[in-house]
Amino acid sequence: MMGSIPDLHADRQLQGNGAFLRTIWTGCPPALRSTLLLLTLLAPGRAERLPLRIYSTADGLPSNQVHRVRRDSRGFLWFCTGEGLSRFDGYTFTNYGTEQGLPDQEVIDFLETRSGEYWVATLGGVAHFNPKPYRNTRMFTVYHPGETALAQQVNALLEDRQGVIWVATNAGVFQLVQAGGQWALRRADAGLAIRGAVRGFLEDHEGNVWVVVFREPGRGDTLLCRRSPSGRVDVFQDDFLRGNRIGAMLEDRQAHIWLGTYRGLALMVPHPQVGGRLIERVYGKREGLGSDEVRYLFQSSDGRLWADTSLMVSDASGKQISFEAYGAGDPRFGGVWEEDRDGNLWRGGRGSPETDLSATARPTALLMRAFGPSLRAAMARFML
């Protein structure tokens, strides 16, 4: 069972008709690791507090640089760091590095397949991971996508509904397939033989696999490719993507596909066609986003959509969309990456040890636990 984030003792009072709370949180000195830090959440005309717990190497992390956070089917959290892979059981970290057989200390992504197998993406190849190997067997079995250094640099992993594992490298797309009980790497379809760095994947509800490709240095463009279950590949070169970068992709529960880009949060048109319109609308600071640059997208279990530090707000029809910016640029809260079994939201960091790995309780979950159901109606407007 995952450990819950401790409650903070707070001096609190209801204001007005009880629709909002003004809360003053107190905590330990920030120089201490594992202390509960304070994060101001800015809503128009009001200030709300969200408790944030920071983890670092002092708590057992192998590195203060965290690239990704993943949760597996048993509730463990896995942290891809600059010095290895780390598993968190809610209380302690268990670390795996090159001494255990990882091909490189820079771990970029982690994947659990539907059958429960673990795969690890590193800058030195992709590794099959057996946390409890039999005697005289290896914990990590390493696969090298190609001979070049760029092909060894793996950026993302995805298992599609056919069980094929997609491998994104800085030299293109590869696939891991199993035959006769053995795994083998192969180049992806000829339609995806596009020069450039592959940065990420998304499989939509129809089984299409979307692939983000950054063109070779000097081009500055992003290609968005769609591979259908039948194997057809469509390549989109929209004006919006020219000189732009896609940092994140997400399909929400209403089957809308969102792109987090350097020029805002983009909503794709349904079923786009090559040569036609790709983007339906772009949202930015004018709509309440904390920044026009969106690097992370996440939908929590309660249906709310996070774009970096901003929470999407929609009316009853779902057509009028705006955003509530949280954190006001505070580096301690750089976006939501994962959710644990207790409903706490997690993010990683790439900065100083004070801002590296944080677990923050959901605003509704923590405040309702602390203050009772009277807050439910006040927070309802944040629900999608």
Image (cartoon, rainbow, N blue to C red):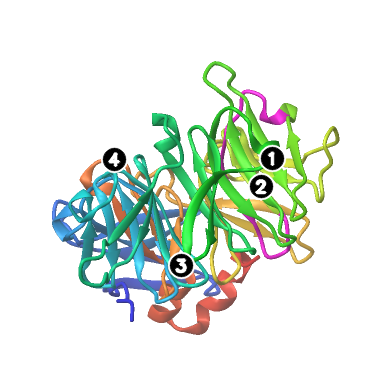
Q: Is residue 104 on the magenta stretch?
A: no
Q: Position of residue 236 (x, y in %)?
A: 74, 35
Q: Is residue 204 visible?
A: yes
Residue marked by disc 3? 363
| Alpha-carbon span between mark 1 and mark 4 | 32 Å
Q: Is residue 44 visible?
A: no
Apparent side of residue 237 relative to residue 168 in the rendered image (left or right): right
- Residue 186 versus residue 378: which sits nearer the camera? 186
N-term-proximal mark, 4 vs 2: 2
| Alpha-carbon span between mark 4 and mark 2 | 30 Å
Please name the residue shown 22% across and 65% down the image: 93
Apparent side of residue 353 relative to residue 130 in the rendered image (left or right): left
Q: Position of residue 354 (x, y in %)?
A: 23, 48
Q: Position of residue 294 (x, y in %)?
A: 54, 41
| Alpha-carbon span between mark 1 and mark 3 | 36 Å
Residue 190, picture quadrant: top right
Q: Which residues, given as a range, are shown in magenta?
A: 240-256
N-term-proximal mark, 1 vs 2: 2
Discs 1, 4 touching: Cβ within 8 Å: no
Q: Which of the image's four quarters has the C terminus? A: bottom right
Residue 210: mark: 2
N-term-proximal mark, 1 vs 3: 1
Discs 1, 2 touching: Cβ within 8 Å: yes
- What amino acid type should be assigned to the residue bearing mark 4? Gly
The nearer-to-camera label among 4 and 2 is 2
- 112 relative to 356, above or below: below
- What amino acid type should be assigned to the residue bearing mark 3? Pro
Residue neighbourhood size for the residue with mark 1, other residues' Cα within 10 Å, grouped as few (<14), some (14–19), many (≥20): many
Residue 351: mark: 4
